[in-house]
Image: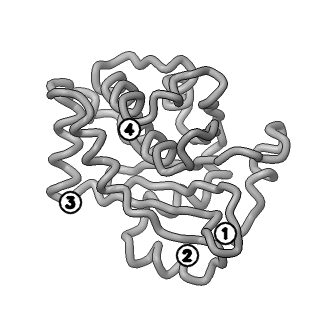
Amino acid sequence: DCTISFNSLLPELGPASRPVVISDASRKYLGGVVAQAGSQEQPHLLWYHLDLMDDIVSSDIMRILAADTEAIEGICFYELLSAALGALVSEPGTPVIVVSDNRACVEVLGKMRGKSAALNSILQRMMVIRPELAGAATLHAYHLSGERNLLADQISRSDISFNRSIFAGIRGAAERDVSGILAALARALPS
């Protein structure tokens, strides 16, 4: 059931008063959900999805990678990219909690520093777009075991039409097209 309470996933966080991003990535897709306070008129569960095989998406990713194409060998680059997109989807000016089943991604977000130029490129570009996310009080990252990350896992392993069919029946859920955010990340710093 997709309507599971986000508080039950990480009870140690207490009631979530800030947006919670739960993200994931695979070799074909990446995506996640952003749970945030909503109203009757506004969605409170935003979901996003990118097809990594799409030519425009691939081009933007190559611009973010710059010369560090070795980073594409591991999944952490895509996991961090998915988390960054989710954080950028969240309401500007609010602190964000990012949850990932990838420990390396959580570590990079916790330190706001990666071990490769490509990971640092994502972080730097995210800070250009939303500088307030650089503060320790505004972005927190937590690890969630893979078996508990069912919703984001489903998004990152299914095509867009399947994901749309799942979310169509969930009240308060809405799709967010993150291709524009990805393009903004690609343009945020000179290549």
Looking at the image, tell me whether mark 4 or mark 2 is earlier in sequence order.
4
Tell me the crowding category of disc 1: few under 14, some 14 to 19, or many 20 or more residues within 10 angstroms, Cα based: few
Q: Position of residue 140 (x, y in %)?
A: 63, 30
Judged by depth in the image, the label closer to the viewer, 4 or 2, is 2
Q: Secondary structure at mark 3?
A: loop
Q: Secondary structure at mark 1?
A: loop
Disc 2 versus disc 1: distance between alpha carbons?
A: 8 Å
**Label pair 4/2, CB-CB below 8 angstroms:** no
Q: Which residue is mark 3?
A: 54
Looking at the image, tell me whether mark 2 or mark 1 is earlier in sequence order.
1
Residue at 30% x, 39% y is: 185
Examine the rendered structure and indicate whether residue 189 appears above or below residue 12: above
Q: Secondary structure at mark 4?
A: loop
Q: 62 or 159: which is nearer to us?
A: 62
Q: 17 or 153: which is nearer to us?
A: 17
Tell me the crowding category of disc 4: few under 14, some 14 to 19, or many 20 or more residues within 10 angstroms, Cα based: some
Looking at the image, tell me whether mark 3 or mark 4 is earlier in sequence order.
3
Looking at the image, tell me whether mark 2 or mark 3 is earlier in sequence order.
3
Disc 3 versus disc 4: distance between alpha carbons?
A: 18 Å
Disc 3 versus disc 1: distance between alpha carbons?
A: 27 Å
Q: Amino acid at mark 3?
A: Asp
Examine the rendered structure and indicate whether residue 127 appears above or below residue 147: above
Disc 4 versus disc 1: distance between alpha carbons?
A: 25 Å
Q: Amino acid at mark 4?
A: Ile
Examine the rendered structure and indicate whether residue 37 appears above or below residue 138: below
Looking at the image, tell me whether mark 3 or mark 1 is earlier in sequence order.
1
Q: Secondary structure at mark 2?
A: helix
Residue at 34% x, 58% y is: 50
Q: In terms of image quadrants, where is residue 180?
A: bottom left
